[in-house]
Image (tube, coloured by chain):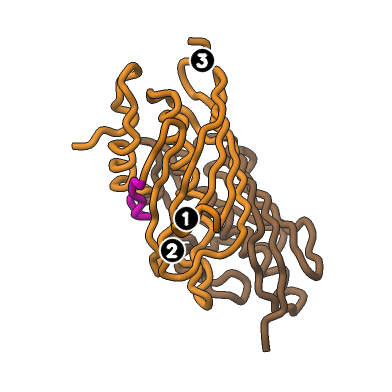
Amino acid sequence: MTKSPGDMAEGERFDPAQISEFMGKYGHGGMLGISYHDHGPDWVALKMDWRADLVGDAQTQILASGPIISLMDMATSLSIWTRLGKFRPHATMDLRVDYMRPSPPGAAVIGRGECYHVSRSIGFVRGLAHNGDPADPIAHVTGTFIRTAGFGR
Amino acid sequence: MSNFLGNVAMPPYALALQIAATGQEDGLPVLRMPFRDEVLGRPGFLHGGAISGLLEIASMAALYSALAAEALEMRIKPVNVTVDFMRGGIDHDTFAVGRITRLGRTMANVEAVAWQDDRNRLIASAQMHYLLRTPKA
């Protein structure tokens, strides 16, 4: 069985591919069918396929904004642990999403989250959602996460 | 329970989250999202994305209701959303309501709040900007 982030020991090397796999099978990530796509030293990319039940406007068949927020929340959250190289409990403090254009019906969405700074208690993130070409984004995201345990360590 | 946001049917995504109207507050629909494994994030807590989804639907519900009250038929397009998370959502039902800050001719500012057992203890809020467009004939 794949480990959940909560099962990880604090000193264990964080593996975004393994954790993403778990997140895509369980809870809300499982409902949305989110899967691992790629990662680098301080970023993680996840993938979400278009699905008829995730549509926000029946007339246009365009994805609702909620699934994109979820995708970006997960990608940016994972990017903090990836940058740190370890799991550290945190919660989303705020997230802002700017929508440049709608995601066309049928197209998969790639959510790339990047952690650009970590302080003792806050992780600062940004990211973008696209349909395969990062130069043609659907949405830009910025946000912060707050450490929920182990302050002052 | 209603499956409509004002005069507009609940979108498939809202139905997937099992969101339904349960009442009104200041004339605008109060929505309920039941707790299920499908809205779970880290163990024991609601996923921030599911809360955001509920806030988004509550904003749309408020906006469609306000447009219907003024007999306006507009298509709405989200421009951006800022979500603040105040408390972790637990394994209970979640409620949300939207409030129109300004309804202009080309854009609308909408705020939505979410809570669980106590209306005065918000778990999250969202501010959304929408573009309003007259439907093409």
N-term mark: 3 or 2: 2
- Residue at 51% x, 48% y: name it: B51
- In the rendered image, the quadrant that contains the N terminus of chain A is top left
- Residue at 28% x, 47% y: name it: A25
Q: Chain of mark 3?
A: A
Q: Give the quarter of the image for residue A126.
A: top right
Query: Could you say which is closer to the camera, residue B64 or residue B137?
Result: B137
Instruction: Report the side of A132 relative to B86 (left or right).
Output: left
User: What's the distance in space between the residues labelled 1 and 2, CA to CA?
Assistant: 7 Å
Residue A141 in the image: state x and y as whole percent. Answer: 58, 46
Q: Amino acid at mark 3?
A: Phe
- Residue at 66% x, 63% y: name it: B62
Q: Give the quarter of the image for residue B73.
A: bottom right
Q: Which chain is orange?
A: A
Residue A18 in the image: state x and y as whole percent. Answer: 28, 37
Q: Is residue A31 part of the magenta span, yes or no? A: yes
User: What's the distance in space between the residues labelled 3 and 2, CA to CA?
Assistant: 38 Å
Start and end of the magenta stretch?
A30-37
Q: Is residue B95 part of the magenta span, yes or no? A: no
Relative to B5, residue A49 above or below: above
Query: Could you say which is closer to the camera, residue B23 or residue A51?
Result: A51
Quickly name the residue at label 3.
A151
Q: Amino acid at mark 1?
A: Pro
Relative to A19, residue B94 above or below: below
Secondary structure, mark 2, is: helix
Quickly name the residue at label 2.
A54
Q: Residue furthest top?
A: A153
**Chain B colour?**
brown
Discs 1, 2 touching: Cβ within 8 Å: yes
